[in-house]
Amino acid sequence: MSNDPLLQPYKLKHLTLRNRIIVTSHEPAYPDDGMPKERYRAYTVERAKGGVAMTMTAGSAAVSKDSPPVFNNLLAYKDEIVPWLREMTDAVHEEGAAIMIQLTHLGRRTRWDKGDWLPVVAPSHHREASHRAFPKKLEDWDIQRIIKDFADAAERMKAGGMDGVELEAYGHLIDQFTSPLTNELDGPYGGSLDNRMRFCFDVFRAMRERVGDDFILGVRYTADECLLGGNGKAEGIEISRRLRDSGLIDYLNVIRGHIDTDAGLTDVIPIQGMASAPHLDFAGDVRAATKFPTFHAAKIQDVATARHAIATGKVDMIGMTRAHITDPHILRKIIEKREDDIRPCVGANYCLDRIYQGGMAFCIHNAATGREETMPHSIPKADLRRKIVIVGAGPAGLEAARVAAERGHEVVVFEAANNPGGQIRLTAQNERRREMIGIIDWRMSQCQKLGVTFHFNSWAEADMIAAEKPDVVIIATGGLPHTEVLSRGNDLVVSSWDIISGDVKPGTNVLVFDDAGDHAGLQAAETLAKAGAKVEIMTPDRSFAPEVMAMNLVPYMRSLQKLDVTFTVTYRLDAAEKSGNQIIAHVGSDYGGVARQQVVDQIVVNHGTIPLDDLYFELKPGSRNLGEVSYDELLTGAPQTVDRNPAGTYQLFRIGDAVAARNTHAAIYDALRLAKDL
């Protein structure tokens, strides 16, 4: 028996959990018609295979029709969910893990123009900033209806084989009842704390009557809203004690903060550059005050922090949820004493930001997550060993090298720079985004273990590639900044990467023209402003930085607003001309009828990249496939068999930004789905 605190079993009521790490409830937005079908099941089961003690799914499943799923949530109010749940829970149990599901009524945290277009409901008319819907103030019949909906849903979850149900309270309807900021009801459900908590207890009581005592019930709730006029820590401790003393639940899952704004949500679920485990000590205070089973998750992204949480008795079960999105096999690697092989969560939050923008949860650097049906987490060996030459050691090139080496191939990588990483190495120069380098460091470590040969400071030429006698050549050379976007004066501008890298000194009065809308534009603006420049960010779009997305935007805005950066939307930089030591910027609009000028001393353009593809086109005539990719074979997971040139001696492919400017996830996905079948 291991003495590792994380590997000790834990008895939760009648349920024995095999270790102390859980995946807390989250909605990856994989449901199909509101059901956990093949994609959802494969994703959930993979984490059970990886050794986690318990996986909680759905963040959260909707119990009522007037709680429409803004994040493509599971629909727990439909009877048809039961057999789909049963398939998933049976598969998870076969892997030795427990499984629970989170149920909710979103209350005001949704929109009336989703689902069946029913009114949003809440215990007041106050709108939630994030979802913008003005709610109907709940009537008595609404309350009784929703209590019954919770009980009905819990009964379905038990019929579907779940080990238990967790109520999602924080930010959702139950919390809206509990908080004095959002509860303006009179009578039995409003006013005193006793009354404000009545709805929660009525829901638990109705659920317990349906599911019996041999079923786990828990609650994820905020024990400190961190809002003036809301429930503070003292009230939160009292709420925690009352939950314990109710006799209706089996554990507490503690949260600190509020999620009604992007900034509040980001403080509850911190991203890269923010403190790790910021609420762990607070969760420990709740456990100490209640002496009741306590769970917690909030940026517990590394094993050392998780081990500390359990070893010091802060909590009984620790959630590593985004970490398991990055690497579902964390427990297996701990057990096998391979912690160095754990793929690190870098806190980029691509997963959650995609959900809140209406997409599926994908990890920025594990392209197999959410694609378990077609993409492997463990790479199988190839039948035939081949020699594969890769040009470029950015995220695409390193992923191709890693996967090809896992396949058992001989892999050689050429890189023009003296270090790997490409654009990621540059973006990681920002103190807040330094964790991004983990994407590169992990791949380099894996490649070195697998015997990949690297040639740095090597500008690859066609004859160098030919001398390697490759079977396959993969061009992953990335791109160069694209600044040729003006009708005249392109020679007067610099790129966002020039500023980020430090190759160009910041000006004093700077216009950043950003129509790529990604991190580089904001990062350059922040670099300029911190150097003392007066900065304006201009975009022709109706919102700025749309590719950065909600939670990643929060720390930028906190920094840029303090630095008094100006944001201008719906205007386009058309041209630039020199005027002494100044630049005249000619500004127009896609909406027409606007032409104005402004004087600056520096213009920075952020317009993505142009593929660095000269070597690819030079090598193309000597390749068997002439660079062609069979999309049918690529998408069905078959080896590439295109043969257009009998005289060719190698297959040739290009991936990532060497094809077109996209993002890190796209580059890594390109590499994985190509190289896994080589």
Image (spheres, grey):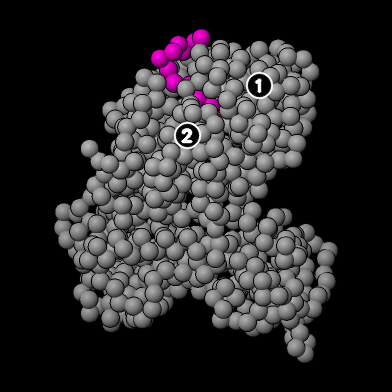
Q: Quick one: label 2 or label 1, which is nearer the N terminus?
A: 1
Q: Secondary structure at mark 1?
A: helix
From this viewpoint, is residue 498 visible? yes
Choose between 230 and 121: the one closer to the eye. Answer: 230
Q: Quadrant of the C terminus?
A: bottom left
Q: Residue at x 77, y 74 (%)?
A: 586
Q: Which residue is mark 1?
A: 197
Q: Is residue 386 above or below residue 604?
A: above
Residue 147: percent from the left, percent from the top?
61, 15
Binning the other alpha carbons within 10 Å of mark 1 as few (below 14), some (14 to 19) or many (20 upward) gives: many
Residue 75: percent from the left, percent from the top?
53, 25
Question: Do labels 2 and 1 touch, CB within 8 Å?
Answer: no
Q: Quadrant of the N terminus?
A: top left
Q: Which residue is mark 2?
A: 295
Choose between 507 and 11: the one closer to the eye. Answer: 11
Bounds of the magenta span?
Answer: 209-220
Which residue ends up furthest to the left in the rendered image? 384
Q: Secondary structure at mark 2?
A: strand
Residue 660 horizontal side relative to residue 12, left or right? right
Q: What amino acid type should be assigned to the residue bearing mark 1?
A: Met
Choose between 462 and 524: the one closer to the eye. Answer: 524
Q: Residue at x 25, y 71 (%)?
A: 453
Q: Is residue 419 above or below residue 221?
A: below
Residue 448: percent from the left, percent from the top?
27, 66
Residue 149 horizontal side relative to residue 38, left or right? right
Q: What amino acid type should be assigned to the residue bearing mark 2?
A: Phe
